[in-house]
Image (cartoon, rainbow, N blue to C red):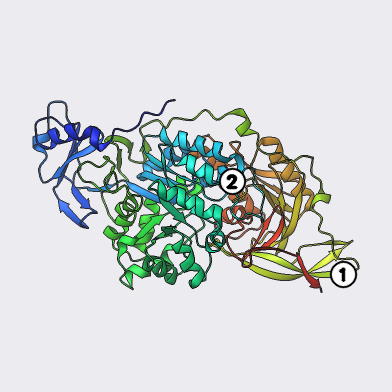
Amino acid sequence: MEHIPFPSWADSAPRLVSVAAGRAPADLVIQGGRLVNVQSREILDGWQVAIAAGRFAYVGPDASHCIGPETQIIDAAGRYLIPGLCDGHMHIESGMLTPAEFAAAVIPHGTTSMFTDPHEIANVLGLRGVRMMHDEALLQPVNIFTQMPACAPSAPGLETTGYEIDEQDVAEAMTWPGIIGLGEMMNYPGVINGSPQMLAEIAATMRAGKTVGGHYASPDRGIPFHAYVAGGPSDDHEGTAEADAIARARQGMRSMLRLGSAWFDIEIQITAITEKGLDPRNFILCTDDVHSGTLVNEGHMDRVVRHAIACGCDPLIALQMATINTATHFGLERELGSIAPGRRADLILTSDLTTLPIERVIARGQTVALEGKITVTCPHYDWPADVRQTVRLGKVLSAADFGITAPEGANAVKAKVIGVIENQAPTKALTAELPVVEGLVEGDNGVCQIALVERHRATGKVVNGFVSGFGYTGEMAIASTVAHDSHHMIVVGTSREMMAAAANRLGLIGGGITVWKAGAEIACVELPVAGLMSDRPAAEVAAKASAMVAAMAECGCTLNNAYMQHSLLALVVIPELRISDMGLIDVTRFEITDLFEDNA
């Protein structure tokens, strides 16, 4: 399906002027509402809106002069008119859905603009995969802007990806119609140390007049942080403390506060506004990573705004952080993010600014959702067959591939263990004394095995280690080809036989997540598109994802949204300890480290 560009303000101006002046009728007029003006942060009772050519033509106290015989009239019946919500930083692939199905899932929740970084698929399929995501995004009835991924691999020398992104790829992508900027610059050590490639990618983005996304995951707010900011990243979503939010704002960055399925970073940071009184226009709300179950059962940006309000934020400020602030940051203040003349006619009708029920959603002047139900079609891209065949194991895996051999003669070992932290992206670097049985190290006292299985080049390589915090008991295993950012396969389990069975199962179905208990599969989410996404409807995928989460709990897992934690165990740019196809990674030093400290 060919993408037809949305007409520009310049192209639409003659019609907009005629409607606003009363010389031509509007397509749609909304009366009887209370307009939330995020430009001035005020509520304007009785203000009316006239829409023409998919844009706001008139916004004022009386739009009767814009009404003609064919004009559709909507009575807002006292409800609030708020701008369509914007997600300032997100990864569509984390929803386990393709862009079309993701759009279909979030439109009823009032999200009309998304700023997406498809670096997950970039690690699997390179620039070609990014282009596919970009092209499907442009087909949608809402605004999906694509950020060109900056880092594939995210940490060169510490992981091997299916494809690599370089500065030439970035420069090419900057010419595509839907590219809004550079995705999160995760290789912050590269920027700090003056990496020619990282700085060249930033330069190509800046020369194109586009925005550079940030990702500074270190708690060090000293000289390294200042060096990173000097390199050009203009926003950051990795803050986990109030001081992080303040530091970013003071350095001229936009501080992005995220609420994902597993990241709960708003409450601890929003006090920079609610208590310290910082200018809220330098703060943006986003989701980062939200899986399909959260989308279907809890919401998207509406959920984030509600949460910010529950954390003490003024509702109008929370709305600014999810609308105009985001648009301004990406240079689109004159295009979206507010209900004002010339902007894309994206708005929501809601009866309450605190609980934020999404009762009608209008995008580009058309009703796209009504009372929680989508009313438009979200077109699909024709994904090629080879994109559904990206899990290449190279061999049938066995329990032996998951055995961890102890140092010769040892009866126990002191092993380094990845410690999962509930509701946060960082991990802890822990140690544990583990027993040795017949020459192999065994998990014990909540410590179970983790393995990374190479799946891009069919090498048959398996890297083994240990992880704690999930609470698994009995014989079990869970495997996933969603393994940020290199997206090999992560397998966690207490049984080597079942770890092998789970890995082989994903090789057969082309990717996804599978949970095994007592020798049998008890849940499976098929993700055949690059091993990351499904092009099935969100409700169907969410049902399988919910069954997967329940299966993890059946295996003893007690963590909130533990699957998100599972999928990040190979993310070698967030401290402290991770696993990659090259070994165990110390992310505080950005180096490969030994699994054993010494013989216990």
Numbered mark located on residue 592 in the image: none
On screen, residue 334 above or below 432:
above
Residue in the foreground of this view, choosing between 87 and 224:
224
Numbered mark located on residue 547 in the image: 2
Q: Position of residue 528 (x, y in %)?
A: 61, 36
Asked if residue 423 lies left or right of residue 448, the reply is left
Few, some or many residues within 10 Å of mark 1 (<14, 14–19, 20+):
some
Few, some or many residues within 10 Å of mark 2 (<14, 14–19, 20+):
some
Residue in the foreground of this view, choosing between 236 and 317:
236
Evaluate whether residue 233 shows in this view.
Answer: yes
Q: Amino acid at mark 2?
A: Ala
Rounded to the nearest whole Å, what is the CA distance between mark 2 and mark 1? 39 Å
Q: Position of residue 425 (x, y in %)?
A: 55, 61
Report helix, strand or loop for mark 1. Answer: loop
Residue in the foreground of this view, choosing between 403 and 160:
160
Q: Residue at x 29, y 36 (%)?
A: 364
Marks 2 and 1 close (CB-CB < 8 Å): no
Q: Position of residue 244 (x, y in %)?
A: 44, 68
Q: Amino acid at mark 1?
A: Asn
Q: Residue furthest right?
A: 409
On screen, residue 486 above or below 437:
above
Report helix, strand or loop for mark 2. Answer: helix
Q: Name the front one of labels 2 and 1.
A: 1
Residue in the foreground of this view, choosing between 570 and 129:
129
Numbered mark located on residue 411 in the image: 1
Q: Residue at x 22, y 47 (%)?
A: 79
Sequence-first disc among 2 and 1: 1
Q: Quadrant of the N terminus?
A: top left
Q: Quadrant of the C terminus?
A: bottom right
